[in-house]
Amino acid sequence: MSNNHLIRQAHLFRTLMHPARLAILEALRDGEECVCHLEAHLGYRQAYISQQLAVLRKAKLIVDRRDGLNVFYRIARPDILTLLDITRAMVGGSVSADLRAAKAVDCPCPKCAGSLVPSAAALP
Ligand SMILES: [Zn+2]
């Protein structure tokens, strides 16, 4: 009997067994984000986020894309979000509450800064 799949499953759960990594995956739920965005929204230092991103990337749960000076990360396996949804429901968490909190952050990343064009245009 081969237990290879059980070992791989255990490795996957071990990768997920980390609140910061779960927070990163949730932050990437709606698409790719750069490290500075994750830093602003999750409240962790960039070095720490980079460390957790490396673990997620090694596990092939996320992929990165360089664009100029920025590196953007996105979810490589969308089915991981289903797993997060199931486990979140089991502990009684709410995605929408987290997303509302995330939107309240003033983020300097190219994507968020780009969405602030109207107010930026009002500046001298
Ligand atoms: Zn941002």
Image (cartoon, helix red, strand yellow):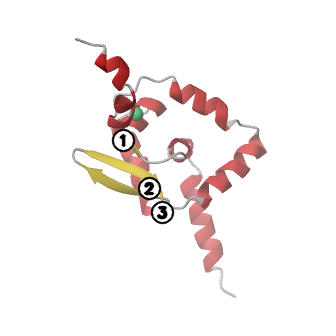
Asked if marks 1 and 2 touch (Cβ < 8 Å), the reply is: no
Q: Amino acid at mark 2?
A: Val
Amino acid carrying mark 3 in the image: Ala
| Quarter location, residue 114 | top left
Give the position of the C terminus as an image quadrant: top left
Disc 1: which residue? 35
Residue 81, numbered label: none
Disc count in the image? 3
Quarter of the view holding residue 63: bottom left
For the residue pair 106 and 13, the one nearer the viewer reads as: 106
Residue at the extreme bottom: 1
Residue at x 50% of width, y 46% of height: 28
State which tag comes first along the sequence, 3 or 1.
1
Please, what secondary structure does the residue beneath circle 2 have?
A: helix
Residue 13 % position (x, y): 61, 59
Which residue is tagged 2? 55
